[in-house]
Every structure is written in C-alpha cells, then in structure tokens.
C-alpha cells in the first residue's frame, strides 16, 4: 500500500543481499515472472524488483498519470525495502519510466533502456515503421481517452483465453520473422502471462500507459546525468529503430547499441546477459546498504 492509499503490485526475486535492479516492464505487462530477465539477473547476483504500473493487475488505477509519476511509486517501494541505491532497466514502454527514474530518483547509479520509446512531441513520423496495430493504437491515443478506450475494449476478454500461438498471430503486424521465431517456449509463455495479468481487471493500465507516452513525460532528457545504455534493433516494429536513434542523439554520452537485424524480442533474448554485464559495470561498486 502506498502513502496515498493506492495499492501497487510488486514482485521481488533473487538474492536478498544482492544489489537491486529495478525493472520497468513494457506495455501492457504486469509484475509477473519473466525468465528471460530474471534468470540472467539472478546469475549475476541481482535482486530484481518489478512493479505493475497503476491500472495493471491489482495496482490501483491513477487516471491522468504521466511518465514521471513512476518515480514517486518507485521511491516508495525502495524505501519500503530499505534500499538507497539501485540499477534501473526499462524495456519497451517501460523505457521512458526508467529514464524518468534516472532523471529524478536519487540513488540510481546507471540506467539501461532496451527498445524504449522516444518522446512524441507531436511529430507524426514518430509512428513511422510501427506495425499496423501500434499505429492504430497510438493514433487513437493522440486523440485522447475517448478515442482509445473503445478501441481497447473491442474485445472485453482481451488476451485472457488465447494461446501463445494465437497471441503471435494477433500481433502479426508487430513481429518480424526474427521475433516470431522466438515467441515460443518459456519466453512466449511468460509474455502472454504478463499481458494476461495486465489486462485481468480491464484496459485501464494499457490505456493510461499509451496516453502517457504521447503526452509530455514530465521531465527532460537532459536532466539525466547517470551512465545511460541504449539497445535498439533495426527490425523492431513495436518501437521503430528511429526511436533508438533519437534517444541516442538526445542522451549525450549514452552508450548506444543500434543493432542491425534485431527485433523487439530477439534483442532481449539474445543479449540480456551482455546488457546486464554492461549495466553492472556502468553502475560501479554499490554502496553498503
């Protein structure tokens, strides 16, 4: 329970005395098991903290939230855990929330953004290169809640009764071949379970995430003064390659890995261990808690 009375779902895994990695997951995902992340993180002695953003799972909705609002929630969780420093990771729609923490949350030693969205700033080319489903969704988000909510509520049981194979087909416009090949076994199972939990009580979490991403984020990228690492694939249809290039251009001094031939899924499945090694090195020696 947060100080303002809201409930926030939190998942904490890994060694109790390990340095903390706060992971902001994508849209529309909740704080559930993600073996592609937790496995490599635990192997490196990291204690992984994930949260279901407001409106997902049992996390109370916070209507009108902005990206920067994730900072206050993250701060309260870390205070409850007695943690004063951490590493931060953001994947996909979680990327901007990780950057917000890098800008405004004390104790962040380094941040890793994987296939994260860039600020919208009213430019329609922001959607260039996205698959049809994301273009449709973000076009509605730009128009506002009245346009987006009916679109999300077209299927009231969204994701709850589908198999991994059906999910892959539903997301066909967003998955290049390099990604489709990896939406199997435990990765596909974990992503589907996370999305099902995110949508379990309705579409509010996904709706508010999408609205927040196309509005001002509430902080400026030039506020970030901690080591920053970016990874983005050239074949990504969920978050286009241009977003990675824009973030690389705007985040002075960031270590940018703009990878040819990688998609939204393949980049995390193939390089998570390498990414975490780079993040740990960038963060330096953690202080004693």
Image (tube, grey):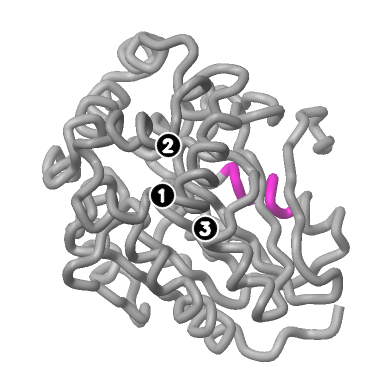
**263 or 252: which is nearer to us?**
263
Secondary structure under tag 3 reads helix
Callout 1 crowding tier (Cα within 10 Å): few <14, some 14–19, many ≥20: some
The residue depicted at 20 percent of the width and 32 percent of the height is 135
Q: Quadrant of residue 238?
A: top left
To which residue does mark 2 refer?
A: 164
In the rendered image, residue 71 lying in the magenta stretch gets the answer yes
Q: Quadrant of residue 55?
A: top right
Sequence-first tag of 2 and 3: 3
**213 or 190: which is nearer to us?**
190
Using residue 65 as the reference point, say whether residue 221 is left or right of it: left
Magenta range: 69-75
Residue 98 badge? 3
> Looking at the image, can residue 219 be seen?
no
Circles 2 and 1, Cβ within 8 Å, touching? The answer is yes
**Residue 21 location in percent, x, y?**
65, 67
**Residue 46 location in percent, x, y?**
70, 73
Secondary structure under tag 1 reads loop
């Amino acid at each position: 329970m947060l100080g303002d009375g809201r409930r926030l779902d939190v998942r904490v895994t890994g060694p109790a005395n390990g340095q903390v990695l706060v992971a902001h997951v994508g849209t529309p995902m909740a704080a559930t098991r993600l073996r592609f992340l937790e496995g490599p993180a635990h192997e490196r002695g990291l204690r992984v903290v994930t949260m279901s953003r407001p409106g997902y799972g049992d996390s109370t909705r916070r209507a009108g939230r902005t990206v920067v609002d994730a900072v206050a929630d993250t701060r309260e969780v870390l205070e409850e855990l007695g943690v004063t420093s951490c590493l931060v990771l953001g994947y996909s729609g979680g990327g901007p929330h990780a950057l917000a923490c890098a800008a405004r949350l004390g104790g962040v030693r380094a941040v890793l953004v994987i296939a994260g969205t860039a600020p919208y700033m009213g430019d329609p080319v922001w959607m260039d290169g996205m698959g049809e489903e994301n273009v449709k969704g973000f076009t509605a988000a730009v128009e506002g809640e009245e346009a987006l909510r009916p679109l999300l509520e077209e299927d009231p049981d969204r994701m709850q009764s589908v198999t991994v194979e059906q999910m892959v087909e539903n997301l066909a416009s967003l998955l290049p071949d390099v990604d489709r090949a990896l939406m199997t076994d435990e990765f596909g199972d974990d992503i589907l379970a996370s999305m099902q939990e995110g949508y379990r009580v309705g579409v509010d979490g996904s709706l508010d995430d999408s609205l927040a991403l196309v509005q001002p984020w509430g902080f400026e990228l030039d506020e970030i003064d901690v080591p920053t690492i970016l990874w983005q694939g050239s074949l990504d249809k969920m978050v286009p390659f241009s977003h990675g290039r824009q973030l690389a251009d705007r985040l002075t001094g960031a270590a940018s890995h703009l990878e040819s031939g990688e998609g939204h899924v393949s980049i995390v499945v193939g390089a998570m261990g390498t990414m975490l090694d780079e993040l740990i090195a960038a963060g330096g020696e953690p202080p004693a808690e």
